[in-house]
Image (tube, rainbow, N blue to C red):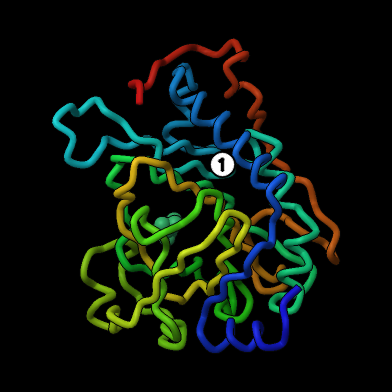
Amino acid sequence: MLSATEIESFRDQGFLVKRATFDADEIARLREGFTYIESLVEEGGIDPQYLSGKDREVHIHIQPQAGAADASVRCLRKVQWPSMIHPAFEQLRTSPKFAALLEPLIGTTLKQYINQINFKMPGGQIEFPWHQDIRPIPAFRAQVDNYVQTIIVVDEATVANGCLYVVPESHKLGNLKVKRYAERQIEDHVDVSRAVALEAAPGDVVMFTSYTVHGSKPNTTDAPRRSYINGFVRASSCDVGKWAFLEGKAVPITSDHDYHTIRRSGKRPISMPPKL
Ligand SMILES: O=C(O)CCC(=O)C(=O)O
């Protein structure tokens, strides 16, 4: 799926937007998954262990709304391992399109370190200060060449709704060893005025290395901006993570935990998180 020029551009610039990778039906299916999780949170009753993420893969992050007068107003920010909650996420995570997209960059036998959905809901004031996605060392080896972060655009991403910005060629600076999301640390090393806005349409896939400096601003529109992140690594370069593809064949997600009990039909003790 990637041309020689695109591969060269990814290696040289540290990022690439692969347009129209997933079609309208696939994005509609993903939106069903988002809607399901949004309704879970809105209706409450989620077992608190999934809100803390302690000892669990699934972590539903709900945070107070920045700047809101009412401290009980909460925003859904992100969910880790949504593939364990709704099959739409699993379907796209293991899509042959991902296997084809990644093969020329990191091969056909891949693990996965990140499976996450991000929500930038209207009024949520959610932003991501400049950062790199450095993966743990020494578990990850030569990660700039062996790890690819991918973001499937679910809602059109624009400057107004807080699309991703990346700093071209910043991956060449290596691991900047600054604390993730710490304000004004990356700026000491990188000329962030060179950043480019990656406006993108639903179905596009934004790809970048774990060293590529990136960040985003709040959504200032009245519509959501949602995205689906999967981080893949060449299996031989990494000692952690879950399997994604074995010689190009999808490996279904596995866990020691049963996440069916997170669902509203589950008879779990009810602890209501504040309404959104
Ligand atoms: O999608 C975005 O706005 C940024 C996401 C990001 O950088 C992150 O989740 O660390």
**Which quarter of the image is occupied by the N terminus?**
bottom right
Residue depicted at x 48% and y 47%:
226
**Which quarter of the image is occupied by the C terminus?**
top left
Q: Front-most of 28 and 33?
A: 28
Q: Is mark 1 on a helix, strand or loop?
A: loop
- Total tally of numbered discs in the picture: 1
Which image quarter: residue 20? Answer: bottom right
> What amino acid is at disc 1?
Glu
Q: Front-most of 238 and 192?
A: 192
Residue depicted at x 41% and y 15%:
271
Residue at mark 1:
57
Decide: is 112 above or below 68.
Answer: below
Residue 159 placed where, x, y %? 36, 61
Residue 153 placed where, x, y %? 55, 55
Decide: is 116 above or below 63.
Answer: below
**Horizontally, is 78 left or right of 92 in the view?**
left
Decide: is 100 above or below 260.
Answer: below
Which image quarter: residue 189? Answer: bottom left
Q: Residue furthest left?
A: 69
Residue 267 placed where, x, y %? 59, 10
**Horizontally, is 151 left or right of 84 in the view?**
left
Residue depicted at x 36% and y 68%:
131
